[in-house]
Amino acid sequence: MGTYQPDSLAGVTNSDNEDDDVSPIEEVRLTVTNTDDPTLPVWTFRMWFLGLFSCCLLSFLNQFFSYRTEPLVITQITVQVATLPIGHFLATILPTTKFRLPGFGSRLFSLNPGPFNMKEHVLISIFANAGSAFGNGSAYAVGIVTIIKAFYRRNISFLAGWLLIITTQVLGYGWAGLLRKYVVEPAHMWWPGTLVQVSLFRALHEKDDQRMSRAKFFLIALICSFCWYLVPGYLFSTLTSISWICWAFSKSVTAQQIGSGMRGLGLGAITLDWSAVASFLFSPLICPFFAIVNVFAGYMLIIYMVIPTAYWGFDLYGASKFPIFSSHLFTSQGQKYDISAIVNDKFELDIGKYEEQGRIHISMFFALTYGFGFATIASTLTHVALFYGREIYERFRASYKGKEDIHTRLMRKYKDIPSWWFNALLLVTLAVSLILCIFLNNQVQMPWWGLLFASAIAFIFTLPISIITATTNQTPGLNIITEYVMGIILPGRPIANVCFKVYGYMSMSQAVSFLSDFKLGHYMKIPPRSMFLVQFLGTIISGTINISVAWWLLNSIENICQDDLLPPDSPWTCPGDRVFFDASVIWGLVGPKRIFGTLGNYSSMNWFFLGGAIGPVIVWLLHKVFPTQSWIPLINLPVLLGATGAMPPATPLNYNAWVIVGTIFNFFIFRYRKQWWQRYNYILSAALDAGVAFMAVLLYFSLGMENKGVTWWGTNGEHCELATCPTAKGIAVDGCPAR
């Protein structure tokens, strides 16, 4: 391992006694070193090789896994840990010979300019972060290609899909460039999430002379994870969801609804499969315990109090006619809705066929999921305004009036990014997007004015949401708002709706992620131009690999995403894309007016907007009335109400496992074995992710492509077939007992 000794670095030295050299934010003072060595090389062969390789690998793995029942997202933390020993190894074996390159004059280059340093490591991780779509797994717009080909069974060209993905990913860079001066350079815009990365980089680069080095521990854990995943991933897939209540009550619909981890409430359901633990919610080892507690409280409230009361107590929205937990769409008689029958040749809603088949019904849980989503959006706005409004306002004012802190002054040593880079990128991306909407309109449906409207929404919201994220670490999403707005303006066009959502929501999200990475580079003293180039190239490469892998899988796996046509142990059920498809039907094809409006069954869900907005006001008033009660301000309604925001596609099994594992490591081990936790916790998380990923890919290429499987009781799913059955009398569904 290499050494990190901030006090001995060349360049600007620390002067903690001088106010000018101290950050005004305590957390930053405790985490980020006030030193820099501008002579450290960053444009090295090692950086380019490991950065490009990790970007390509993560892009492939995350897109590959996105279609699986338990989609594992490989994040940059895995790359942070894995590339460190490789970087040191390359620094040992590469030749140090210096040479000249044509066109670079007398400048000397070397494949090995010295020890592997932290700045190289940061740039490699930022490359990788682009490969994981800034922590989202794969590019959001790939979902549009998937639902067109796998769910609607229509066609879209590779070119249209590629342009859609690249433009939605890159558009946010333009917004970010315009706002960088306001939310990156000011000291009061401190981006709490980036401090985790800074801490990890510093920990990894400290001197490591323990007998069990981090590299050795990582290798051992990776091998164990790799070998073990052969069992739940191939030989004994039932271990992915051990729903023992279903086994004990094999003939009871209600018992299986309660006990199924994948299709029910998941009471007592556990897993021995790391991919199920880390799916949807990411690794619990890297989530702080207070956040786990908040999510657990909201999960318990919604899943074990609200849902049973609404389903069995009030039969809300005729809940007993449908499964208790499902993201499918149904007719009034509990049968799956034939979506293809209501889509005409122009890929729009056929009103006559829709009226013939009747209104769309959704499971009571799915309806409440949207309701809680509405409440989460509204409560986030009021919660942030009441509890953080003054802080945000004061910090934004201070960002104008305050002096430059030590980190901003240290960054003045490096050439800044010219504004015209961002402006040109923004104009080119908008021009290409307009070409897509005008000349390939028959494939994307969205009119040119829809693109401009979505772009305006994204630009307007990027600054306030960036400020909220930079000061509170909460990032409100625009996905429901954008699809709601477009569904009202232009109903009947499903692809236009999802394109509007992706351009409006995703470009804003990309801008916030881009700014967050820039703040990491700011703290780590990475030259801004190097940051920009790495992020831009990483985004183009990852988007291209995402669409290529998606195209390959969609054209090579029979019945991919069709869970009613796939074998029971098939992993290719596309749970995330199923929800994306249903959203395109609800908001785009049929439109919110026919679902949540006067022509639909779920208009009362709109009251959740009001409830969500009022909730934080009540908490804030209680805090003012009882200021000595320190627990009251800890009630974070956006987190509580949004706890189950990943459901569906996430299931109670994922939440159960995530909470249990997170509590073990981030409460018990953190409290009673803190040295072990500090040294190995993130390393273990990265190794478990990497081991599962490599074995899953190996299994697919060696056995899955040849359809060679093992068939026995332990590979026939979780054995909760009755969990999807309705309980209402007179509703007949294939495979379910008559009532």
Image (cartoon, rainbow, N blue to C red):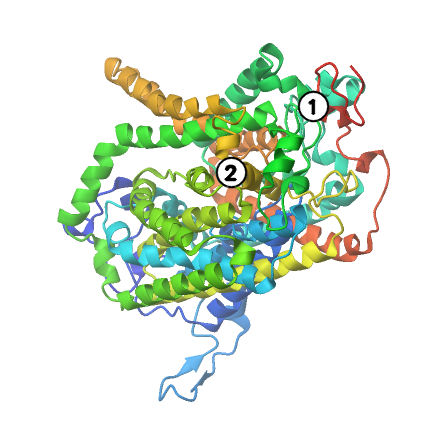
Residue 161 picture location, percent across and down: 56, 59
The three-letter amino acid code for the residue at tag 1 is Gln
Image vertical order of residue 592 relative to residue 198, above or below: above
Residues 231 and 181: in front is 181
Q: Confirm whether residue 257 shows in the render.
A: yes
Q: Is 107 on the left or on the right of 228, as rendered?
A: left
In the displayed orientation, state which residue is furthest to the right: 712
Determine which quarter of the picture holds residue 14.
bottom left
Residue wearing tag 1: 333
Q: Residue at x 75, y 38 (%)?
A: 564
| Callouts 1 and 2 close, C-beta under 8 Å | no
> Residue 327's image quarter?
top right
Amino acid at circle 2: Trp
Camera-side residue of 524 and 717: 717
Q: Which secondary structure, mark 1?
A: loop
| Quarter in which the C terminus is drawn | top right
Q: How many angstroms separate mark 1 from mark 2 (CA)? A: 22 Å
Residue 587 is tagged as: 2
